[in-house]
């Protein structure tokens, strides 16, 4: 009998549970987008957006930006923008990058 009374004593009121549930319902988490940790990641994201790289080739852009110096990547991007006339510019970017100097 004594255990039952203690359980009633510590049991919160129904309105407290409802207000707690209401607080959690009001709190909506906004997805947080992490900023790039390295300069090459930021450059890769810029190339992806500017050249319209498809999802299955985005990893290749990150790998190229990580392996090559920022100067080489920037020159390849500039050459791609100047020289591509028709077709997909992201394919041309990889061709230009392959003809540049080798990774460091």
Image: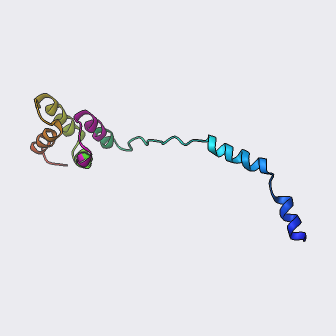
Q: Residue furthest right?
A: 2
Q: Examine the rendering and report whether any part of residue 66 can be seen.
A: no
15 or 29: nearer the viewer: 15
Instruction: Judge from the rendering whether residue 9 lies leftward or rightward of residue 58; answer left or right.
Output: right
Instruction: Judge from the rendering whether residue 61 lies leftward or rightward of residue 4; answer left or right.
Output: left
Q: Which residues are magenta?
A: 44-57
Badge count: 0
Magenta highlight: main SS:
helix
- Going 29% across and 38% down the picture, which residue do you hit? 43
Can you tell which quarter of the image residue 87 is in?
A: top left
Can you tell which quarter of the image residue 79 is in?
A: top left
Q: Examine the rendering and report whether any part of residue 81 can be seen.
A: yes
Can you tell which quarter of the image residue 29 is in?
A: top right
Q: Position of residue 102 (x, y in %)?
A: 14, 48
- Going 30% across and 42% down the picture, which residue do you hit? 40
Note whether 26 is above or below 83 in the view shown.
Answer: below
Q: Position of residue 101 (x, y in %)?
A: 12, 44
Q: Position of residue 22 (x, y in %)?
A: 68, 43
- Going 90% across and 71% down the picture, which residue do you hit? 1
- Going 9% across and 43% down the picture, which residue do you hit? 99
Please say whether residue 51 is one of the residues in the magenta stretch.
yes
Please say whether residue 26 is one of the residues in the magenta stretch.
no
- Specify how the rendered protein is coloured: rainbow
Q: Position of residue 76 (x, y in %)?
A: 16, 37
């Amino acid at each position: 009998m004594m255990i039952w009374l203690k359980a009633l004593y510590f049991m919160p009121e129904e309105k407290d549970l409802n207000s707690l549930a209401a607080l959690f319902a009001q709190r909506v988490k906004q997805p947080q987008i992490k900023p790039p940790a390295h300069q090459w990641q930021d450059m890769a994201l810029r190339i992806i957006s500017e050249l319209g790289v498809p999802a299955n080739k985005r990893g290749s852009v990150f790998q190229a930006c990580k392996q090559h110096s920022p100067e080489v990547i920037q020159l390849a991007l500039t050459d791609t923008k100047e020289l591509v006339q028709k077709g997909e510019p992201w394919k041309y970017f990889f061709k230009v990058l392959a003809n540049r100097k080798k990774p460091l």
